[in-house]
Amino acid sequence: MLKSRVVVSGDYRGALCYIAAMGILNGKNIVLGLSGGIACYKAAELCRALVKAGANVQVVMTEAASAFITPVTLQALSGQAVYMSQWDARQDNNMAHINLTRSADAILVAPASADFMAKLLHGRADDLLSLACLARPIERVPLLLAPAMNREMWAHPATQRNVAQLRADGCTVLGVGQGDQACGEVGDGRMLEADELLHTLEAFFAPKVLLGRRVLVNAGPTYEAIDPVRGITNRSSGKMGFAIARAAADAGAMVTLVAGPVALPTPHGVQRIDVVSAEQMHAAVMAQAALADVFVAAAAVADWRVDQAAGQKIKKEVGAAPPALRFLENPDILAEVAASERARSGHLFCVGFAAESENLLAHAQAKRARKNVPLLVGNIGPDTFGQDDNALLLVDEHGHRELARASKADLARELIHDLAHRLASKTP
Ligand code: C5P
């Protein structure tokens, strides 16, 4: 768990009054329900991931689920006795459906079979899981369903009708995956993977501090061609920028992510524009910046490009001198956005990044002034490239604040909270 630490200095606005909650699922009480389906095997992994994320997981299984996976597995993974029956005598008052749901922060049924959803729809309650869903305090305990079934069952009008009605009743019915099914058919109906469900739950609980805001992020390296098979790039993985895009989307923002060449999946709900060179990134960002409220320049944009990349592969001739490359300076995307009318009039908040190898504070302060941005985020390049964790230094006109080493997901969430606070405090 990341501990936010105010290090120095001056009058850092908001540092003391706002420390974002980290590890969104930490301490959450999740009732994980399993109904019958082959996707029960994914629920084991999900259970483990939830526990790892700090959640307190109480598993409730239907009898059909126990035909696919044993309660022993789920008990071992959750660290708690699994409940299956409404007649479970372990509860003093014999009211497991009440006791298990009163302290729950959410019920997630994964997998939710077609039959289980049909049962929920009618408010039937002849097993502990459906009884618990019905008995939960509906205003306080959200119910999320992760459907899993054969593609014909999923596409059937009865199932689709049930899904629509369950949504109208206030359930969050998650989407389904597409692909090979256990039955040998191919199509829609697979349960989402454990990591997708974990992310969905995190997004569900994320405070919507950027609701309605339009956030533009650029991320990753650029690639400047020398010839059709060679080029110049850098070691940026794009992970920090992608984590920021995801955290912004989870916080309710409409997010556009302009991505250099990286091998990362698009965060859920984020509009992605893939580019290769700095000039392409410049064009995409300038077009999008006209609509944005926030621009986070996390990309490692190449400072120079090769003047007139060769049309064909440059051949190595025996004894010949190496080719002399001439470079042109690339546009400074951040500086240009920061100098735009939209930014100068206060309608677009710009955040720069600095990847340094030493003297982080001094370099970050100098870069903030040079780029003329209100917030500059510094990090040590060799300590972050390709890693899943990082440490950040936030520098503004009042001082600086360190975000100690943590996962890029946690740091991104904290940065988004910091940004939301800055935006809120300048909105009349
Ligand atoms: O000047 P330097 O590359 O160190 O500055 C880093 C910051 O400037 C980052 O936010 C990066 O995205 C941005 N930048 C840019 N266009 C460039 C070079 C850097 O937007 N050509």
Image (cartoon, helix red, strand yellow):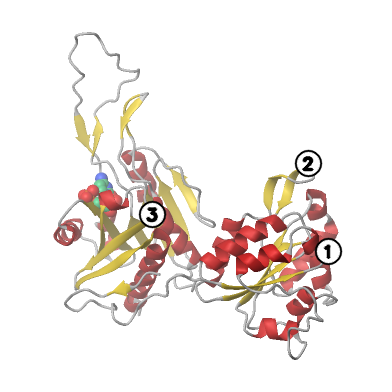
Is residue 384 or residue 89 the one in the foreground? Answer: 89
CA distance for labels 2 and 3: 38 Å
Q: Residue furthest bottom?
A: 93
Q: Quadrant of the N terminus?
A: bottom left
Q: Is residue 95 left or right of residue 261?
A: right
* Quadrant housing residue 185: top right
- In the rendered image, which residue does mark 1 sit on? 115
Is residue 270 or residue 78 the one in the foreground? Answer: 78
Q: Residue at x 42, y 71 (%)?
A: 22
- Amino acid carrying mark 1 in the image: Asp
Question: Which dot, 3 or 1, sits closer to the camera?
Answer: 1
**Numbered disc 2: secondary structure:** loop
- In the rendered image, which residue does mark 2 sit on? 184
If you read the primary sequence from the N terminus, does the residue marked by circle 2 or circle 3 appear first?
A: 2
Looking at the image, residue 211 lies above or below residue 305: below
**Numbered disc 3: secondary structure:** helix
Q: Residues within 10 Å of mark 1 (few under 14, many from 20)?
A: some
Q: Mark 2 and 3 residues: CB-CB less than 8 Å, in contact? A: no
- The residue at label 1 has a CB less than 8 Å from ligand 1: no
- In the rendered image, which residue does mark 3 sit on? 241
| Residue 137 seen by the camera | no
Q: Residue at x 16, y 60 (%)?
A: 369
- Amino acid carrying mark 3 in the image: Gly
If you read the primary sequence from the N terminus, does the residue marked by circle 3 or circle 1 appear first?
A: 1
| Residue 159 seen by the camera | yes
Q: Residues within 10 Å of mark 3 (few under 14, many from 20)?
A: many
Q: Count up the numbered dots.
A: 3
Q: Quadrant of the C terminus?
A: bottom left
